[in-house]
Amino acid sequence: MTTVQWTFITLIAAASCTAITYLIFRQRERRGILAAQGEAEKIIQQARGEAENQRGMLLVEAREQALVIKADADQDVVATRKQQLAREQKLDRRDESLVQQEDSMQKQRRGLEATQTRLAAQLKQVHAKHADVDAILERQREALERVSGLSRDAAGKQLVESMQRELDGELGALVLRHERRVSETLDAKSREMLLTAIQRYAAAHTADSTTSTVDIPNDDMKGRIIGREGRNVRAFEKATGVDVIIDDTPGVVIVSGFDPVRREIARMSLVKLIDDGRIHPSRIEEIVAEATVEIDALVLRKGREAAEETNVPGVSDKILQLLGRLHFRTSYSQNVLRHSVEVSFISGLLAEMLGMDAALARRAGLLHDIGKAADHELEGGHPKIGADLLRRHNEAPEVVHAALGHHDQIITEYPYTMLVATGDACSASRPGARRESLERYVKRMEELEQIAKRFDGVQQAFAIQAGRELRVIVNADRADDKKAAKICRDIAKTFEQELTYPGEIKVTVVRETRFVETAK
C-alpha cells in the first residue's frame, strides 16, 4: 500500500472516531435532559402537594377566625341589646317622673292662682287704707300750717337749718376733742418709741485725736528718723502728707495731721521703719506703700464688719470701701462709722415699731452719711454726694432719698427718710457725743486743701501744723519753676482774701522731677 492510501485510511478512521464521539456525547446530553425533565416534574408535583396542604391549612385557619369573629359579633350584639334595654327602662322611668312632676306643677299652679286671688283682695284693702291715711295726714298738715303759720317747705327748711347748726357745733367740738386726744397719744407714743429704740441700742462714742504717738527704743532713733540734713523726715512727710514732731520729749515721736487715714498710714509706716532699722528715702516710700495697702484692706474689712453688724447684705465693695473710710472720719468728734451703725439700728427699731420694713430702714441708716467718705474728692455737700454714689450703685430709691434728705433740706418723699433723720438726730444729740470745735477745725483743714487744689498744675495738697502750714505738690510736667513760684504766691493771696485766721499760714510748693531706671 502506498503512503496516500495509508493517509486516506487514517483520515477515515479519524472521521469515524469523531462521529462516534459526537454521537456518544449527544446521547449522554439527551439522557441528561430527560433526567432533568423528570426531576423537574418531581419538584413540580412536590410543590403542588405542599401548596394543596398549605391551602387546606389556610382554609382551616380562616374558618376558625370567622368563627371567632362571629362569636365576638354575637357578644357585641348581646351587649348592645342589653344597653338599649337599660336605656329604654331608664327612659320609661324618666317619663313616669315627668308625669308626676307635671301633676305636681298643676297642683302648685292651682294653689298660686288661689293665693293671687286672695292677695289681690288684700291689696285692694291696703290701697283703701292708704287713701284714708293720706287724707288724715293731709288734714293734719293743713292744721299744723294754720297753727304754725309756715308752709311745708319753709318748715322743712327751718328744721334742716336748725339740725345743721346743732351738728356743726357738735362736730367741731368732737373734732377738737379727737385732735387733742390724737396729739397727746402721738406725742406719748413717739416719746415711748424713741426712748425704747435708744435704750435698746446704746453705743459708746469714741473721739479720735489729731495726733498719734509712736514709741521709739532710744533717743538715737530720733536722729536716724531725721536723717542727714533732715532728708529722711522730709521724705516721710512728703510721702504721707503729715507733720512729724520730734522734740525733747524722751522716747516718743509725734505724728500730726487732721486726716486720720493719712495719720494712721504715717503711724504704721513709722513703726515699721523703726522695727526694720533701715531708714532712708527709698525705704520710706516702700514702707508707706505697704502701709497704704494694709490700710485699704483694713478699710474694706471695717466696712464689711459694719454691714454684718447691722445685718445689711448685698452692699457693693465700692460702697463698703467708702463705708470703711468713715471709721477714720469724725463729725464733731463723733466717729462717723459708729454713728452710722447707731443710726442704722435706731432706724430699724423704729421701723419695726411702726410696722415698716426694718431691713430697708437699717440699710438707709447705715449708708446715710456715705458722702462724707468722698466729700474731699467731689464737689457739693455730703448728702448730694452720698445720694449720687448710692444711685450709681443701684441702691433702692428709699436709701438714696434718705442720704439726700436726712438733714431736712428737701421735701421728704419716703417715710424712711424721716426715720433716718430721727435716728441721726438721736445719735447726734446724746450727751457728750459731739464737740463742735473739732468739726470746725477739720473743715478749716479741708478748706485750705480745697483752695490749693483749685489751681492748675497742683497734684496734691496737705494741711499740717494745725493749719499753720500748707504743703503743695505740683506736677513737674505741667508746671516749671516759675509757674510753681506763681502758684505759691497766688495760693497765699487767695488765703488772705477768702479766709479769716489767726496768725500766719505758710505755703510751701514742692516741684520734683524723678527718673528711675532698673539694671537687669
Image (cartoon, rainbow, N blue to C red):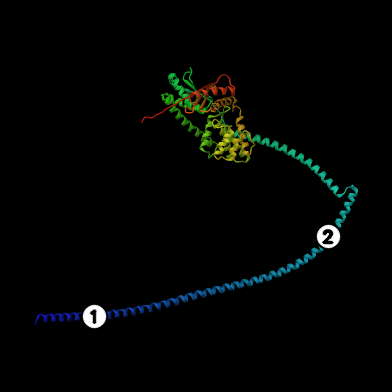
Residue 127 got which mark? 2
Image quadrant where one finds the N terminus: bottom left
Q: Position of residue 389 (x, y in %)?
A: 55, 36
Q: Position of residue 504 (x, y in %)?
A: 56, 19
Viewer-closest of 271 and 514? 514
Question: Seen in the image, is 313 located left or right of residue 96?
Answer: left
Of all residues, the one furthest to the left in this rendering is 1
Viewer-closest of 253 and 476? 476
Q: Position of residue 362 (x, y in %)?
A: 58, 37
Residue 26 got which mark? 1
Q: Amino acid at mark 2?
A: His
Rendered image quadrant of residue 110: bottom right
Q: Amino acid at mark 1?
A: Arg
Which element is circle 1 on? helix
From the viewer's perspective, is the residue at label 1 or at label 2 nearer?
A: 1
Image quadrant where one finds the C terminus: top left
Give neighbour class at mark 2: few <14, some 14-19, many 20+ (Cα, 10 Å). few
Of all residues, the one furthest to the top in this rendering is 248
